[in-house]
Image: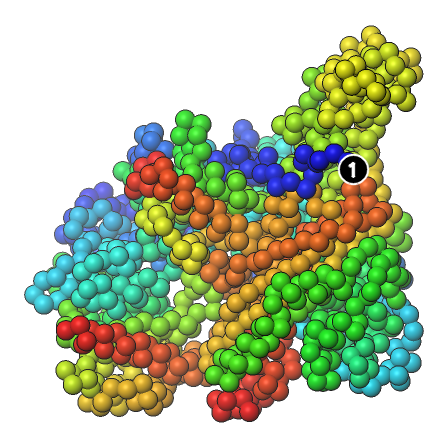
């Protein structure tokens, strides 16, 4: 494009901020309707038990209690939840999740009874007055235990607790490439269970109009149309009579993709009680009942040559799914994981087998990165371990293996769209002063300081997703995105997107695209999202898809607007359409810039409709459904420099550099924000967070006091740099930046910590690398004394 | 002495400069009083263990977690919430700084962050990055990685120094 | 979450409060800043029938020097202690310790009386107050008792406070001479309770030997622990970091710290030594500075 861009690529401050910084946002808990009542859920004290009896009589007598409802009440009124990702060729079992348990509870986040009361305080009083008799059943929380013969069984439909078994082989046979290898490295990695912990817990408000049969549900959702489709189905009401509104949503990170029992319950009760019903999850409930992420045990084999060339990767994974199969759960440890196991490398063989395992724990589904962090962790840890075994610098091992140029068809069958993998890698090393730090490391080690440098080179598939591929994997819908762009008579523009940003800032970045393309001020563009009654059916915001897929739809729709506007402009200017040029918001006759009409003039003319060409309908709006032809493949290299306290083993990150190529960046300010937040969530997995269950299935980390999401003091400043290699198949050239940080950061930090301890001879410690866990690993390996003696 | 003690108490306080009075249950938390009784929903509830700080408001000039204060404890107090921070349509320098530096994403933690920094920057007009990080250790954010929050706070400090608005208490 | 129902008393005087405690003490909880009690009430782990709120009683919040000691009113907040000029000069260990408690908002509301009465075994104050051999003053309608903090705290969440008593004051010594103090806290995430916390006080003789050494630890037992072995080892010796390093090994003598999801007992034992050494070295450095300037 010849002319200077006014909006795209600029650091535009956000349009959504004025309401959010003044307390005028509208989150679900802020909604108050006349006559509204409050629901609260009773959750069981056992992770696995038969419900023998429930006595609600005392609770019902508490003044202010409107009713107490058990599983028996809902059993025949509401269908159980099932997964929406019916993974193909994997023998997926038809596990059902009743919204309120009626025979058995299978994890401590199940719902046993629902109280509705005039105020929440009373509702919680009533919960305490419900008497439930349980028959405790044996519990299993660990995947390796759950697949053993004789383990407690969760569902009759899934014998042996195996929900599915998925296999994938790409490229050459692993055993064959192993014969050519000089070393085979075998490792067992634990990718620990994480808890997404959006700052806003989940919530729902439902209101029913019996006269029209219309049900409105406000819910914390990343995908309101998907919520509507699934909820209409389980509630047995026509889709067009259900309106789902996701207003301001306080973060999601994947946890607000699934449809959960909570919103279904309040919807049904609003219909039955004739009063609006609100439920707001407590934080404890969020820990127990909202999905968790990761939770793999990965058995990994890597075959490599002496020069560091990695030939093949074989992975056997047990993926913990929790007690039920959540909405997108089957796709996460399979498609989004297995297909990423060759990473940005020229690996020749990928052989992966994943068992999805049911346990008495909270269901596991997509948490930021979803499958791709797990794959990247395996590869990046292995790159470092291979380097160690071969006595090579980890940077050199990556140099040997990185793909030289794109497009590139990986052994997984994916075609990486564009990228300069080596160049970006070298740039990251340079910015982070990698070799200078190597010198510092060896100097300081002599003085007893433990400094480590960690590299992580990643690629990810995002911009989910070409519908034909999504469907081929068993996903319930296509993965296109929609938009309706409506130009009003004054030339102001409303954009109704099927995406649903909840912090990412597309009210701004989409407006940038529209303002850029139409040559109008950004103030004249409003992005509307989250309301199924206003927006066309769309898939929502997750999988780093909003800019590359939703944004591409916006671009396409605006192109249609321009096309029609050009016709109208030609009529107004009494010129031929092919002679009309458009620039800076003005249509003019080629060679006669003085003969022009503004975009606003054209918009008005579209509505006055008296001067339209014969083949042009009145009005000026366009709808676009963009179905990507390929995934997008952001990639990059992150480098962490850490210092480990040689006595307490507390880790301090001294420097963190992220170099990411996510294609064309619409708004660097927002893109950096995505990297910062993503990196910190990745650091959190490396150093702080893990969900801990006891053997009885009690979650011991069920609050921010015990589940360690980092504070500002626990994390460093993040240096974010971009390279912009456009995605050739994407109208915007954009790839998506929402998950790169989370994917890259975890292995960068773990590699750095293990690098700091390398001279002691310890190769791996499972995450999170808390001071205690590092100390314990060194102690068990008998290395503490060696460290005290100076590490030699 | 109130005989057997009160289950319902009358509270009066000044909220964002306006006097308010209400009869509330003794067990009602200040955050619920602000949100549900006064309709000031800018103050959020993010946890139930006093960790997250989303509910932070200014009480008698100091940042407090309003989920860990009963409404009756604020009887007679002056409360400032996020809604009371902008004056006559003009954003407070901290709000401006958050907007300019992309100090928020989902916005849920933001009111609490801003109110904590309001207290902190009034006390420490020239903070270092480390001091800012320490000041907000009781405010969790899951979106920003804190990078731009810290940047916003440092920018706000500079703005506040420039306009001399670090007078303690009140709005 | 939502606390269970209770009845509240808001006494306007100390006498009134003590009268209420005499009558309802068995079934009542005293509410000060609320930062120990309200979190428990919100999770309904504590459901008192009565709450006696002492925040409206005048004269319970003060820090003043009187009779050779510093008296601190029970309602004094951690923030007031952290920022007190008097303490910074004459007993900096307490203000330094206060600055490590919770976070800014917690320090604004939480009180020294509330914290001590709650007796969390990983709380910060008890280490400093034990090292300082501080007193607490307990009042009831019947009279007053003064106890050493180390006697007052009996175990995890367990104190010698009787149902009719109110903790009204904490007394810490005015430190003088060539003293130095330090509080070192090991935590895994900012704002948390201590994995191990060590408070150290060192007083040097004019010649530069250890005249008095006090070390106490929190988080490593049912109640705060005086590291008497370390103190004995050092007192009277010529001051040096080497001596400290050797003596600090004795910090783990007799310790039986708890194990939990964060760390094992053994790790805490080992870290007791590390933090004791670090606290003593810093205290020594500060004492030497003071010695030099005197």
Question: Which residue position holds label 1?
Answer: A1
Q: Residue at x 81, y 41 (%)?
A: A731
**The furthest residue to the left:** C67
- The number of numbered discs placed on residues in the rendered structure image is 1
Question: Between residues A129 and A492, which one lies in front from this camera angle?
Answer: A492
Colour mapping used in the image? rainbow
Q: Is residue A18 left or right of residue C95?
A: right
Mark 1 falls within which chain?
Answer: A
Q: Is residue A325 left or right of residue B12?
A: right
- Image coordinates of residue A66 in percent, x first then y, are 54, 39
Q: Position of residue A488 (x, y in %)?
A: 72, 20
Judge left or right: residue C135 versus residue C186. left
**On screen, C22 above or below A779?**
above
Near mark 1 (Cα within 10 A), the count class, few <14, some 14-19 or many ≥20, is few
Q: Nearer the viewer, residue C196 or B96?
A: B96
* Residue under the image location 44 percent in, 69 percent down: C187
Q: Quadrant of residue A616?
A: top right
Toward which corner of the image does residue A46 lie, by quadrant?
Answer: bottom right
Q: Is residue A297 visible?
A: no
What x and y, as percent, mark residue A250? 58, 45
Seen at 91% across and 76% down, the residue is: A173
Quarter holding the C terminus of chain C is: bottom left
A456 up-or-down from A478: above or below: below
Residue A687: name its quadrant: bottom right
Q: Position of residue A395 (x, y in %)?
A: 70, 73
Name the residue rendered at 34%, 29% in the picture: B18
């Amino acid at each position: 494009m010849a002319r200077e861009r006014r909006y795209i690529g600029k650091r535009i401050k956000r349009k959504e901020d004025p309401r959010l910084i003044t307390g005028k946002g509208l989150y679900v808990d802020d909604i108050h309707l006349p006559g509204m009542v409050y629901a609260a859920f009773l959750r069981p004290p056992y992770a696995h038990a038969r419900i023998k009896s429930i006595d609600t009589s005392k609770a019902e007598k508490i003044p202010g209690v409107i009713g107490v409802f058990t599983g028996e009440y809902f059993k025949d009124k509401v269908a159980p939840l099932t997964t929406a990702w019916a993974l193909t060729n994997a023998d997926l079992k038809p596990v059902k999740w009743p919204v309120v348990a009626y025979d058995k509870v299978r994890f401590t986040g199940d719902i046993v009874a629902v109280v509705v009361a005039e105020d929440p305080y009373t509702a919680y009083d009533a919960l305490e007055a419900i008497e439930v008799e349980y028959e405790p059943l044996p519990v299993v929380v660990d995947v390796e235990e759950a697949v053993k013969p004789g383990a407690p069984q969760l569902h009759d439909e899934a014998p042996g607790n195996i929900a599915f078994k998925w296999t994938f082989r790409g490229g050459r046979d692993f055993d064959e490439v192993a014969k050519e290898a000089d070393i085979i490295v075998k490792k067992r990695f634990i990718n620990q269970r994480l808890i997404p912990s959006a700052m806003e817990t989940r919530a729902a408000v439902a209101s029913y109009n019996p006269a029209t049969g219309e049900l409105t549900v406000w819910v914390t959702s990343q995908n309101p149309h998907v919520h509507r489709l699934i909820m209409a189905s389980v509630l047995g009401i026509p889709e067009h009579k259900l309106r789902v509104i996701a207003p301001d949503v306080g973060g999601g990170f994947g946890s607000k993709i699934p449809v959960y029992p909570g919103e279904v319950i309040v919807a049904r009760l609003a219909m039955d009680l004739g009063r609006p019903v609100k439920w707001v999850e407590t934080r404890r409930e969020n820990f127990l009942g909202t999905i968790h992420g990761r939770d793999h045990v990965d058995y990994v084999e890597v075959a490599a040559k002496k020069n560091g060339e990695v030939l093949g990767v074989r992975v056997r994974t047990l993926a913990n799914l929790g007690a039920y199969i959540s909405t997108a759960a089957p796709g996460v440890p399979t498609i989004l994981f297995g297909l990423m196991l060759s990473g940005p490398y020229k690996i020749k063989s990928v052989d992966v087998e994943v068992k999805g395992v049911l346990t008495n724990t909270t269901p596991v589904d997509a948490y930021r990165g979803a499958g791709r962090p797990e794959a990247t962790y395996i590869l990046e840890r292995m790159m470092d371990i291979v380097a160690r075994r071969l006595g090579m610098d980890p940077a050199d091992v990556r140099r040997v293996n990185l793909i030289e140029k794109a497009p590139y068809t990986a052994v997984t069958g994916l075609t990486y769209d564009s990228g300069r993998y080596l160049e970006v890698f070298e740039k990251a090393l340079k910015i982070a002063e990698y070799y200078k730090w190597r010198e510092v490391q060896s100097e300081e080690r002599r003085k007893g300081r433990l400094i480590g440098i960690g590299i992580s080179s990643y690629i990810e598939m995002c911009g989910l997703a070409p519908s034909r591929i999504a469907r081929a994997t068993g996903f319930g819908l296509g993965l296109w995105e929609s938009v309706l762009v409506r130009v009003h008579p004054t030339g102001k523009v409303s954009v109704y997107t099927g995406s649903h940003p909840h912090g990412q800032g597309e009210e701004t970045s989409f407006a940038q695209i529209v303002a850029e393309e139409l040559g109008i001020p950004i103030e004249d563009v409003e992005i509307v999202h989250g309301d199924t009654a206003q927006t066309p059916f769309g898939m929502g915001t997750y999988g780093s898809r909003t800019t590359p897929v939703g944004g591409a739809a916006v671009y396409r729709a605006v192109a249609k607007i321009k096309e029609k506007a050009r016709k109208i402009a030609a009529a107004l200017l009494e010129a031929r359409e092919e002679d009309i040029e458009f620039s800076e918001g003005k249509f003019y006759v080629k060679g006669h810039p003085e003969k022009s009409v503004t975009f606003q003039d054209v918009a008005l003319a579209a509505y006055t409709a008296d001067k339209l060409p014969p083949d042009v309908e009145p009005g000026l709006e366009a709808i676009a459904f963009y179905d990507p032809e390929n995934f997008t493949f952001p990639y990059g290299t992150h480098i962490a420099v850490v210092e480990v306290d040689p006595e307490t083993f507390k880790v301090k990150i001294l420097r963190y550099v992220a170099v990411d190529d996510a294609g064309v960046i619409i708004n660097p300010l927002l893109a950096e924000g995505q990297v910062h937040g993503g990196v910190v969530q990745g650091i959190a997995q490396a150093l702080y967070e893990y969900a801990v269950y006891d053997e009885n299935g009690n979650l011991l980390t069920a609050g921010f006091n015990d589940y360690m999401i980092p504070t500002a003091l626990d994390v460093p400043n993040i240096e974010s740099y971009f390279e912009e290699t456009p995605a050739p198949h994407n109208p915007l050239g954009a790839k998506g930046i929402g998950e790169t940080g989370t994917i890259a950061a975890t292995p960068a930090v773990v590699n750095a910590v293990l690098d700091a301890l390398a001279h002691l001879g310890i190769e791996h410690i499972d995450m999170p690398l808390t001071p205690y866990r590092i100390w314990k690993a060194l102690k068990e390996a008998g290395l503490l004394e060696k460290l005290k003696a100076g590490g030699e | 002495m109130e005989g057997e003690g009160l289950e319902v108490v009358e509270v009066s306080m000044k909220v964002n400069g306006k006097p308010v009075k209400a009869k509330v249950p003794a067990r009602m938390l200040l955050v619920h009083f602000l949100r549900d009784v006064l309709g000031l929903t800018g103050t959020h509830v993010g946890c139930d263990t006093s960790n997250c700080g989303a509910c932070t408001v200014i009480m008698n000039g100091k940042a407090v977690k309003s989920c860990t204060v009963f409404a009756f404890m604020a009887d007679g107090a002056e409360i400032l919430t996020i809604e009371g921070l902008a004056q006559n349509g003009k954003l407070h320098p901290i709000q401006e700084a958050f907007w300019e530096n992309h100090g928020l994403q989902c916005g849920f933690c933001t009111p609490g962050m801003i109110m904590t920094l309001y207290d902190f920057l009034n006390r420490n007009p020239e903070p270092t990055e480390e001091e800012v990080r320490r000041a907000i250790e009781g405010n969790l954010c899951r979106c920003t990685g804190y990078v731009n929050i810290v940047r916003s706070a440092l920018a706000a400090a500079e703005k506040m120094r420039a306009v001399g608005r670090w007078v303690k208490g009140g709005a | 979450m939502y606390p269970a129902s209770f009845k509240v008393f808001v006494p306007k005087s100390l006498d009134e409060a003590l009268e209420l405690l005499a009558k309802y003490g068995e079934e009542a909880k005293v509410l000060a800043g609320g930062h120990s009690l309200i979190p428990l009430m919100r999770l309904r782990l504590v459901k008192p029938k009565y709450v006696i709120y002492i925040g409206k009683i005048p004269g319970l919040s003060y820090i003043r020097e009187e009779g050779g000691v510093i008296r601190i009113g029970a309602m004094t907040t951690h923030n007031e202690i952290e920022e007190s000029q008097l303490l910074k000069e004459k007993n900096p260990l307490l203000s330094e310790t206060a600055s490590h408690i919770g976070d800014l908002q917690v320090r604004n509301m939480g009180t020294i009386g509330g914290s001590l009465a709650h007796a969390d075994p990983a709380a910060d104050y008890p280490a400093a107050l034990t090292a300082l051999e501080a007193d607490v003053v307990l009042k009831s309608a019947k009279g007053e008792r003064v106890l050493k903090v180390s006697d007052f705290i009996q175990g995890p969440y367990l104190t010698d406070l009787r149902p009719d008593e109110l903790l009204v004051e904490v007394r810490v010594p005015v430190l003088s001479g060539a003293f130095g103090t330090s509080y070192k806290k090991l935590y895994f995430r900012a704002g948390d309770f201590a994995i191990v916390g060590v408070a150290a006080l060192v007083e040097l003789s004019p010649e530069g030997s250890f005249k008095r050494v006090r070390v106490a630890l929190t988080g490593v037992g049912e109640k705060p622990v005086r590291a008497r072995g370390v103190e004995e080892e050092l007192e009277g010796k010529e001051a040096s970091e080497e001596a400290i390093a050797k003596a600090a090994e004795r910090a783990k003598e007799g310790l039986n710290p708890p194990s939990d999801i964060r760390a094992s007992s053994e790790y805490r034992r080992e870290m007791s030594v590390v933090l004791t050494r670090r606290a003593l070295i810093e205290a020594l450095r500060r004492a030497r500075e003071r010695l030099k300037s005197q």
